[in-house]
Image (spheres, rainbow, N blue to C red):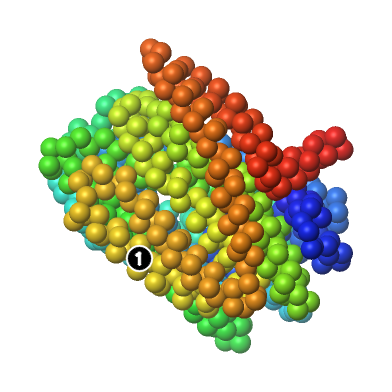
Amino acid sequence: MPDEFLDAVERSEPGTEPEPGLHPDHDPSDYGDLGTADRPGEEGNEIGGAAHSAPGNLLRSSAIMAAGTVVSRITGFIRTIVLAAALGTQLLGDAYQTANMVPFAVYDLLIGGLLASVFVPFLVKRKKQDADGGTATEQRLFTVVLLVLTVMTMAAIAAAEWLIRIYAGDFTGPQHDAATLLARFLLAQIFFIGASGIASAMLNSRNRFGAPMWAPVLNNLVIIGVGVMFLVITGPATPDSVTDGQLTLLGVGTAGGQVLQALVLVWALFAAGFRWRPRLDLRGSGLGEAVRTAAWMLVYVGVAQAGLLVTTNVATRAGVRAAQEGESVAGAGITAYQYASMLFQLPYAIIAVSVITALLPRMSAHVADGRKDLVRLDFSRGLRLSAVLIVPLSVAMIVFAIPFCVMIYANGNTSVEDARSIGRILMVFAVMLIPFTMFQLQMRVYYALGDTRTPSLFALPAEAAHAALAVALLFLAPAQLIVVLLPIAYGSYYVVGSALAWRGLRRRLNGMDGRRILRTLLLLYAASVPSALFAIAMALGFGLLPGTLLPNLLGMATGGAVGALLFVLVAKRIGVTEVTTFLEMVRSRLLSR
């Protein structure tokens, strides 16, 4: 669909013509897990030999991946709701979220970025070039990765208490003890996260896409079961009341989900014909050269992890400070921030990532042909395409954030006030959707140009802005409002990064079609105003009814449906051609079926 829309927009714009032969066909399976497409160089890294598969195999792989992605996202969403009900969003929830965040942060910092951005393309290259089809390289890479993961995991478990102090310096007493105990179990995930990563990469290089897309579903199902068991056994739980046995259930169960995911993927890899023979004869293997090419990638990953460290410390300290000051601790810490962040990124993950999937090969082809003018036009179309849906969705998120969060999160140990706090954070996040999307699209332009150095350099001042604003909130904002305002600091990264990237790309592409982009964005926001006013009226009107679930559901359903219709009518009236073209394309697509 993205390719068809982009071509349709080309035909609808004066002064542009279709570019025959410059839009290579693409298949979703060429891009691995789209949910991880935020690091430089990741798009298309896990392609293996997909491009050489038969059309039937490509269609079959696409269908399997699409189904797996949808089910994975649905079960992941249910997992979050269950954990919110089991742990709440206050001190115990913060302890669990921090302990579970640390293993992924350590893994990404030390090996995750390298595996995704350097070793996977290296493996694909060696499979094509080596006389043995890359078998020796696979044996060496698998051996080295498992050894490194073993050392990393053992060291991290031994340093569990210090890692919790680094990421949550204000945790004290029972909360610190709970987080440390959980971390000792959850840090064991580092090995299995890495084993899943290398197995998935090697499966993709064999054109086996089903297991990597479906294995996370098993992980989610295990954690859902563990969360339900924890809620039934403990009932209302706090760091003071929860027992070591109950925390052990939570820690072992969460880690067990990751273990099951890794075992399934390794089994699938062996079923695909891989036989592991440990090899450490690294001299002349080319692995050293692959590592040396990762310098700028390491800069980018390091900056990203520094940002995570700052955000986690600010949010966890806010939750502790709210409790110490005797204020309401409802949704004042890292848990509420994480739950809101997950909802914030859904529109981007569903809409913009698919556009990026279509744009990257197109722009890369234009660069290869020396047509940077077409790169500029594709960026413009991609951003405007994303904005057609992201702008009204961001407005809808602002209007419906609180009732939606109350509807899905206000269960078990998460109170209505906790859920409202998540909604308030989500409202602020929603304002940042367009800067976030713009930055991601601009980074893909740089990758199409073959430049990963410049995005890494942009990350430094962008992260400085984020860190400065985030830390300032600890000193300037009341404890209860820190995490509500924290998305502003998060968004400043993308605002600063977008400004710097825009300036650099404008010089390299002889312009960025800025006037047309700005006009489209302003018109889209203007077209959203009547819809927003109607939606607010519905939310307030149905909010007068007793209860929470039914009034919130009715308000969102009525406001959303009528608001969408109003948006389309107003957009057509004021001449937003992208909306009209999009609707025509959808209608023709449906009729063709």
Q: Residue at x 58, y 51 (%)?
A: 521
Give coordinates of residue 200: x percent, y percent: 61, 57
Query: Vertically, is 119 above or below 336?
Result: below
Specify the farthest residue to the front: 574
Judging depth in this view, the residue of 562 and 593 nearest the camera is 562
* Residue 93 shown left or right of residue 559 in the figure: left
Query: Vertically, is 524 above or below 511?
Result: above
* Residue 17 shown left or right of residue 203 in the figure: right
Query: Vertically, is 62 above or below 566?
Result: below
The residue identified by callout 1 is 465
Near mark 1 (Cα within 10 A), the count class, few <14, some 14-19 or many ≥20, is: many
Query: Vertically, is 37 above or below 546?
Result: below
Q: Residue at x 75, y 50 (%)?
A: 5
Give coordinates of residue 32: x percent, y percent: 65, 57
Residue type at numbered disc 1? Ala
Give coordinates of residue 258: x percent, y percent: 48, 48
User: Is residue 189 visible in the rendered structure shown here?
Assistant: yes
Q: In which quadrant is the C terminus drawn?
A: top right
Q: Residue at x 84, y 61 (%)?
A: 18
Judging depth in this view, the residue of 86 and 180 nearest the camera is 86
User: Is residue 31 visible in the rendered structure shown here?
Assistant: no
Q: Residue at x 45, y 38 (%)?
A: 398
The image quadrant that residue 308 belongs to is bottom left
Specify the farthest residue to the left: 325
The image quadrant that residue 365 belongs to is bottom right
Give coordinates of residue 139: x percent, y percent: 62, 71
Specify the farthest residue to the top: 546
